[in-house]
Amino acid sequence: MDIGGKSVAEAIMVQGLKKVYKGALGDSVAAVDDLNFQVDQGQIFGFIGPNGAGKTTTIKMLLGLLFPSSGKAMVLGKPAGDIEAKKRISYLPESPYFYEHMTGVEVLDFYCKLFRMDGATRKRRIAELLEQVGLTQDGKRSLRQYSKGMLQRIGVAQALINDPDLLFLDEPTSGLDPIAHKDIQDLIFSLKQRGKSVFVSSHQLSDIESVCDRVAIINRGKLVKIGSMEELLHIGRTVITVTKAKENLSSEVKPLAERVSVDGEFMRIYVDNEENVHNVLDTVRGKCNLVSVVPQRQTLEDLFVEIVREARK
């Protein structure tokens, strides 16, 4: 991909990806149906959809845990499942499981050994990871003493052991308290600042909206929408607030507005298109005190609900 004359490498490239499961009665169901998208290196990419949309199936194919029925998936320039690519990626599932009798240090030490790190390297890496996820003071406590947020943090630390170039996160902030929630968001941003690519699947749409550079929405196995937040979300309506309105001003602006509300001396005029914003401002000029004109952008949740409801009709 070229951006401003510069070549940007692809962390993930998916072309015509499809996964079909055979039913007990000989029928077939396409869990993923002709997906096409790409994720640039150094990008935080959101992947969302309702339950059963095909998100987990797609992630498993990108990880090489499932084979596609047809199509192509490239990860870090190599076919999905390639051993060399796997060394440079990592995955945090929605509900990671660890032995609760082990301490945080013991868990990380176990996974460090799987990467064949020597003792000195393991000790240094474990200390770095515990500090990175805010568990330095709790590394020697057993996991049965950990809260859900602490377990999620140790899961993130485990996923970062190999310093991956591409990290897959499935519901990384689910069930976390506000502080842990913010810490995980900050950690995701810090990975991007280090040039890492992050693929995030979550039902926490406000998180996706705040951290992701681009988002793909899938439904029933098909890609429905993809783009940056600026491309996906539009200005929904504008709220014009005035005070000290002259008599009958409300009735004058009602034909131009979606609705008008009066609260004490404040009148709020809700307008659903730009042309009417100018018309309302022309109408109220000289007949009140203008307090504010505030455009309200559509949220990712608004767009998501709109797409899913439309698909169910």
Image (tube, rainbow, N blue to C red):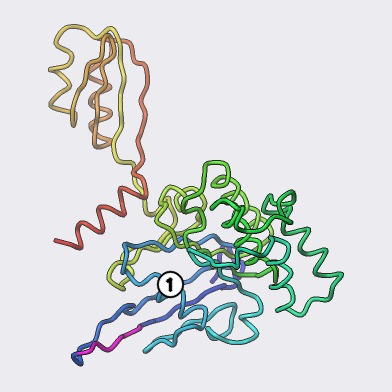
- Number of on-image labels: 1
Return the residue at label 1: 37
Q: Nearer the viewer, residue 103 or 188?
A: 103
In the image, farthest residue toward the front: 101
Write down the quadrant of residue 78 in the picture: bottom right
143 is higher (above) or lower (below) than 289: below
276 is higher (above) or lower (below) than 308: above
* Residue at image coords 28%, 9%: 265
* Residue at image coords 40%, 63%: 216
Helix, strand or loop status at disc 1: strand
The quarter of the picture where the C terminus appears is bottom left
For the record, the magenta segment spans 19-24
x and y percent of residue 267 in the render?
26, 16
Q: Is residue 66 left or right of residue 138?
A: left
Q: Is residue 190 left or right of residue 276?
A: right
The quarter of the picture where the N terminus appears is bottom right
Is residue 20 inside the magenta stretch? yes
x and y percent of residue 19 in the render?
35, 83
48 is higher (above) or lower (below) than 295: below
Q: Is residue 105 left or right of residue 18?
A: right
Type of amino acid under label 1: Phe
Write down the quadrant of residue 81 in the picture: bottom right
* Residue at image coords 25%, 21%: 282
* Residue at image coords 37%, 50%: 300
